Amino acid sequence: MLKFELSGQTYNKTAHRRALLERLAGRSEGAVEMKHQNISAVLRDVGLFWIPGYKPRSNYQDILAIEVEKWVSENPEIDRHALAAAEAPAATPEHFDFTTFQVSSPSLREDWEAGVREMPAPFGEETRVAVRRDYAACEARNSSLGQAGEELVVKFERYRLSKEGLGNLAAKVEHVAKDRGDGLGFDVLSFDAEGKERFIEVKTTAFAKETPFYASSSEIRFAQKNAERFSLYRLFEFRKTPKCYTLPGMIQEHCVLDPISYRCSFR
C-alpha cells in the first residue's frame, strides 16, 4: 500500500485489511487498524512518509520497529518511490471548492509541552537502519509544490474575504513570496474583517496531516514578533483533495521545535 501511495496509484485499504484478517487468528479489524497506525509511527520515526488515514500511534513494540526497518532495508526501491513523490511537480487547482478546505489541526497529547527541545533517538542511542535521505526536507525544497500551495492560499483568502462581503480587501491580498521575494518570514499578505493585515506562512505537503514540516529561524522569529497577526497554514494531501489547518501565533505554541542541525563556527 505504501508503494502505491508514493507512486500515486489507487489501492483499497479495506480489501487489504480483510485479506490480512484471513491470515491472522483472533484479530479484529480494529486491532489491524491500530497496528497499521503503529507502522505509520515507525515509518515516521525513520524519516519516511506513511499512508494518510493511518494516524501514527507511537506506543509500538520494539519487535515491530525491527520488522518494519528490516522491510525498508530489504526494499531499496522504496527510496526511489519516496524521493520521486517528494520531488514531483505540482500545480494549483484551477477550480476548487473551498467549503471543505479548512479542517482542525492535529490533536496534541495531554503531556505535550511547547517549545524547542532536542528529540531523543527513536530507538535508543543508535538507529538500526540507515535512512537514505530526509524525504520531508526534499519535499520542503520542492519549489513547484510550495508555490502551488501558496497560490491556493491566495485564492482561498480572496474567496474568504469576498464571502464576507469584503471584496475591496480581497483585491489587496498579495502573494508576497512571489511579488517581493522569499525570506520575509511569510508568504501571503491578507486581512481580517477589520482590515488589519494578516501575515500567512504556507507549508505544503502531498502527504498526511501529521507530516512534519520545516520552519526557518527567520520564520520562527517573525512569528514571535508578529504573533497577533501571524498564522501558519499547513496544506496536506495536496495532490488528492487539498485540505488546510491553521496554526495562529507563535509556531512553538503548537509544535515541538526540533533543532536538527547546528551552525558550527570558530570563535
Image (cartoon, grey):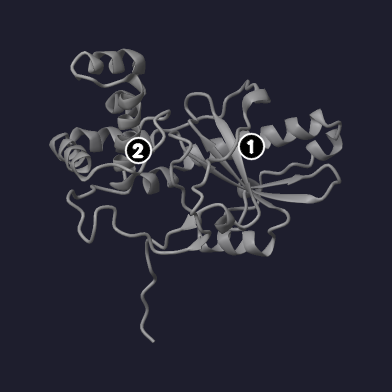
Residue at 77% in and 51% down: 197
Q: Which mark is residue 153?
A: 1
Q: Based on the displayed image, in which of its 4 quarters is residue 18 positioned?
A: top left
Q: Quadrant of the C terminus?
A: bottom left
Relative to 62, say whether 99 is above or below. above
- In whole angstroms, how far apart are the C-alphas of marks 1 and 2? 24 Å
Depth check: 51 or 158 in front? Answer: 51
Q: Residues within 10 Å of mark 2 (few under 14, many from 20)?
A: many
At numbered mark 2, what does the secondary structure look like: helix, strand or loop?
A: loop
Residue at 62% in and 52% down: 186
Relative to 86, say whether 261 is above or below. below
Q: Based on the displayed image, in which of its 4 quarters is residue 207 positioned?
A: top left
Depth check: 86 or 72 in front? Answer: 72
In the rendering, at what x and y percent does residue 131 appear? 23, 48
In the rendering, at what x and y percent does residue 246 appear? 62, 42
At numbered mark 1, what does the secondary structure look like: helix, strand or loop?
A: helix
Amino acid at dot 1: Val
Q: Hey, which residue is sitting farthest bottom in the picture? A: 267
In the rendering, at what x and y percent does residue 123 appear? 24, 53
Q: Is residue 133 visible?
A: yes
Q: Is residue 28 left or right of residue 224?
A: left
Q: Hey, which residue is sitting farthest left in the picture? A: 74
